[in-house]
Image (tube, rainbow, N blue to C red):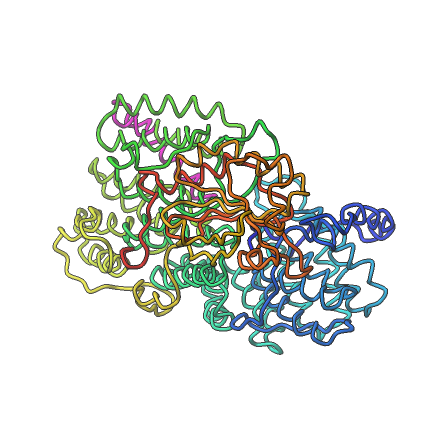
Amino acid sequence: MRSAPGSPSILLVSIPLALVLGALPQARQKSAAYAGRDDRTPGHSLRGHAFDQGPRQKPWKMEGIGKAHLAITTRVPEVQVWFDQGLALLHSFWFYEAERTFRWCIELDPECAMAYWGMALAVESDEERFESLLSEALRRKDAVSEHERLYIEAWVGANAPRLEGRFETKKESDSGPPERNELLERLEKLVLDYPDDVEAKAFCLLASLGQGGRIANEALFQELVAVAPEHPGAHHYRIHLWDDSEQGDVALESCAKYGRIAWDVGHANHMPGHVYSGLGMWREAGLWMESATRIELRQMQERGLFPYDYWNFAHNRNYLCYIQEQQGLVEQALLGARTLLASPTKPVQDEHEDDKGEEREDEVQFEGMTALVRCLLKFERWDEILRADAIPWKKTDEHAAWRAYAEALAHLGKGEVPEAIESATALQEGIEKLKDEWSKKGFQRGFREVDALIRLRTERELEGLSELEELAREQALDYRRRDDPPDDRALYYDLLGELHLERGSPKLAVECFTKALELVRNDGFALSGLARAEHVLGRRPEATLAFGRLRHVWARADAGLRWMEAARALGLQSEPIDESPAKQRDYDSQALVKLGPIAWEPFAAPELAAVDADGKAIGLEELRGQNVVLVFYLGGQCVHCVEELAALAKRAEDFAALDATILAVSADAPADLAKPAALKGLELRLLSDPEHANARAFHAWDDFKDQALHATLLIDRQGRERWAHVGATPFSDVERLLEELRRWGSASAVASVPGDSAGGD
């Protein structure tokens, strides 16, 4: 059940169909090479390498995911029911569970072409694996209907772009004509040939996002829901259609419906939050984003999964932090950032020996760092930024530049100009070391910001203001208000407005704060500044209106925020005013506790009931108070397994220093545990699990093919599972295991994260 989702591939960029079909024998040959192996290879799926990744446990009938239906050819009637479940999951981008469901279809009917098609679309960021599975569907296309064949061939020859690439329209600055969307053309043919096919229209709507006008796509949506009013994909894709538009309120009806139709899908609760954020409806956005977070965390606890098993979880949690920031809920936002940083790291092994031991950052950790640094900067927590243990900086070039930027701003905020110049110099030097052009571009803008602020404080005021104005214009051009939470610490127009107020230019300040509110609707920082600027100008009604709007947006804000206190000190009298396109509910985190926890927490490990070489029963209970490295290996005959155990034993002292005991479990009989010469004398405990009962309990088992898998798990002193790698190969990166163990006992500010009982709910 444990895999590390990446970017999904449901929409793909196609090559000409005639070329692909003409090369089908070669494609089949490639697939055979990719899938072919000795069926007796331990740990690997008997269906081939394409099945070695992804979920290895059977699905269950799911509720709260919406309904979808596409008639398929199968010899087993039950397959149709499971296929429809997988299809509904695809429409909500729940790829991990969709793949599990389609795998079960294949087990029930290995010749079901559309089951391979569905599993291919559920593959995440692995082009070769996608092609291998789709070629299996192509091999069976002659046994299906013409309708199904068009579905299969529509995706032939596709690549797998990142998810966000599917919804990006071509910008004016992009050179060259737009790429031909051949997938869309094929789906359009499917719609024309089968006008009653709801699924074809849904996929066509998805494929056409960012292609052409929204009105045409809206018309397709209306045609679709006229016959299928509660289709999950229709409402999901409509939300994406209007998400980054000035007219986001067009999708409000779908926001409400999608969350009700697919109420137990995290992404169905997440996407409405996008639209509400774009409209400045921060209360409603918070309700949806936090619901998505809690639903996914509950599912993790129920199914023994981790944050990296949900491809959208970290993005969702970061977005919730941003929404909380926009409501002045600083402590809740910081808690959210730290829960991400305290989450288990993604169990990916370095392929090259030279890479082992290098500090790196997975998606969950990156989103946590982004949220933490953004929030600390936005709310001017200068001392905390400069405190050595407050932010878990890593020893990478990117983090070095990031840290220099944050500390330069902190020194400036404290009036420490020489120290700020020193940090700015470090930032400039760090930028030169960056290899990633996108990161380099972002930090170059950060350096310009820092440099402008230094000029303002070193008698070069006009130069500084001019540079900030240019930065503000640039930010306004590329500011993706309704897509993802911004990484920027602030709107430059907000910063400029404050500077103009300080320098006695309230008219310029009003202009800046007004522009900021055009970029981010109901932005509390801009509303506070606008109230103060209008008050200086003697325009009391305008100042009162801005203050009333601020009172609504920051109704639950943390006490003592200087922006609220400065506006309140004006003595304006106004009830809270909500200038939103629709009525909002109150956002109260405590009321959402019933949906699930707000932070990932380790879950109770299953009971271990194995015996050692002497036949003595060994369980986790007797090891309570110690950390445990629990390894399921395939027996002494498995060369790679023995290598893994030897590598662990070689670092036995390092594990012991972290109070960690190594247990290695296999199906070998007690008397055979230490027979292999390579296992003799190793500092670890070998245990016997002859009936694989323990392997099944710890998910080190392939339910589909009824065979053992490799698994390495970390269990803490309280008997809770904190990390796991399960798959076709052993986890040989010992340093990564030690690094993960070290995180638990760290004195870092993110090492220990409270749950709901102390988490600001």
- Outermost bottom residue: 227
Looking at this view, is 221 or 348 the one in front? 348
The location of residue 371, given as percent across then percent down, is 38, 45
Q: Position of residue 345 (x, y in %)?
A: 47, 44
Write down the region rendered in magenta: 452-479
Tell me: 381 left or right of 520. left
Give 667 or 247, whichever is nearer the viewer: 667
Q: Residue at x 46, y 51 (%)?
A: 315
Quarter of the image containing the N terminus? Answer: bottom right
Is residue 210 shown above or below 439? below
Magenta segment includes 475: yes
Residue that extends furthest to the front in the rendered view of this protein: 614
Residue in the foreground of this view, choosing between 529 and 166: 166
Give the number of callouts. 0
Answer whether residue 6 is visible to the viewer in this image: no
Residue 548 pos. (x, y %): 22, 60
Q: Is 669 on the left or on the right of 488, as rendered?
A: right
x and y percent of residue 165 in the render? 59, 49
Pick the quarter of the image with the C terminus: bottom left
**Taken as a whole, is the magenta stretch helix, strand or loop?**
helix
Residue 84 falls within the magenta-colored stretch? no
Q: Is residue 380 visible?
A: yes
510 with respect to 321 (left or right): left
* Image position of 517 with respect to 276: above or below: above
Camera-side residue: 273 or 148?
Answer: 148
| Residue for point 44% across, 32% down | 653
Residue 601 found in image quarter: bottom left
